[in-house]
Every structure is written in structure tokens, then in C-alpha cells.
Image (cartoon, rainbow, N blue to C red):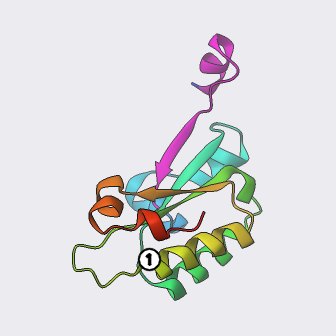
Amino acid sequence: MKISINNMNPEIVVSAAVFPQLATAVSKYAQNWYEWLSKGYIDKIYLMAYTTSNDDLEKLLNQISNLRLNDKIVVGLKAWDSSKKYKVDDINFKIKLSKKLKFAGISLFSYSGIRNNDYFKNIKF
């Protein structure tokens, strides 16, 4: 598929949003994103790392960093909480961690959650 797309337009980036724990992604969702990236089947993945726990995210991202594909991985972060217990400082910690580990970027989900929690003015990109 990537070859066909690149033949039409080599500027198109082929990406996928994937579950972050590789073993679960492969066994439960048929998402072998490590193989897809390693073999060049896709250009980037958007890791759905939607945990509110800073410790869990740090552990996950350190494990994924060992795969040495950070330049092809965009970290998707949870940026909402209907209970109002998830603070913008936690989101900022996760952004800073993702940058420190030199991932390809971050994406925040979801826009309405960020807006409804009034996080926009305090998120530090």
C-alpha cells in the first residue's frame, strides 16, 4: 500500500494510530507496529498512550525508546478528564518527557476535552 501511495505522491506520510503496548497490540489487535515501522510499511505511528499516570507513561516510553524508532513515533497523550482530577501539569510533564526522549512529536486527544477543561492557556508545547 505504501508503495502505491508513494508512487502517486511521495510527499504523503502513511501513518497509523496504534495501541502502545506492543505485545497486546500484536496479539489482540493485529497491530505489529514495530514490524510496520522497521520494514518501512508505514512512515509513522501515533501511539495511543492515553494513561493519566506519569509513572506508567514514563515506563512505557522508556521501553519503546529501546526499540530505537523514536523518530517515527508520535506520542498521543490523553489531555482530558471529565472528573477534573487530571491536571494540566500532568499533561505538561508528559509533553516534556516525550520531548526529552526525542520522539517525533506529540498529539493531544481530545480537542473538546482540552477546551472543556480550559487547558489551552496552560499547556506548554
Over which residues does the magenta segment extend? Answer: 2-19
Q: Nearer the viewer, residue 15 or 75?
A: 75
Which residue sits furthest left? 83
- Residue 25 lies in the magenta-colored region: no
Please tell me how crowded label 1 is: few (under 14), some (14-19), or many (20+) other residues with Cα within 10 Å: many
The residue under the point 35% across, 81% down is: 86
Image-quadrant location for residue 104: bottom right
Q: Position of residue 89 (x, y in %)?
A: 49, 81
Decide if residue 124 is on the left or right side of residue 81: right
Residue 44 versus residue 111 in the image, above or below: above
Which residue is most to the front? 121
Q: Residue furthest top?
A: 8
Residue in view at x 53 percent, y 88 percent:
55
Q: Is residue 11 magenta?
A: yes
Amino acid type at image mark 1:
Val
At 53% across and 78% down in the image, what residue appears?
Answer: 57
Residue 24 visible? The answer is no
Camera-nearest residue between 4 and 113:
113
Q: Quadrant of residue 10?
A: top right
Residue 115 position in % (x across, y down): 32, 59
Element class at badge 1: helix
Is residue 106 at least partly visible in the picture?
Answer: yes
Q: Quadrant of residue 78?
A: bottom left
According to the image, label 1 marks what residue?
88
Q: Quadrant of the N terminus?
A: top right
Question: Which quadrant is home to the C terminus?
Answer: bottom right
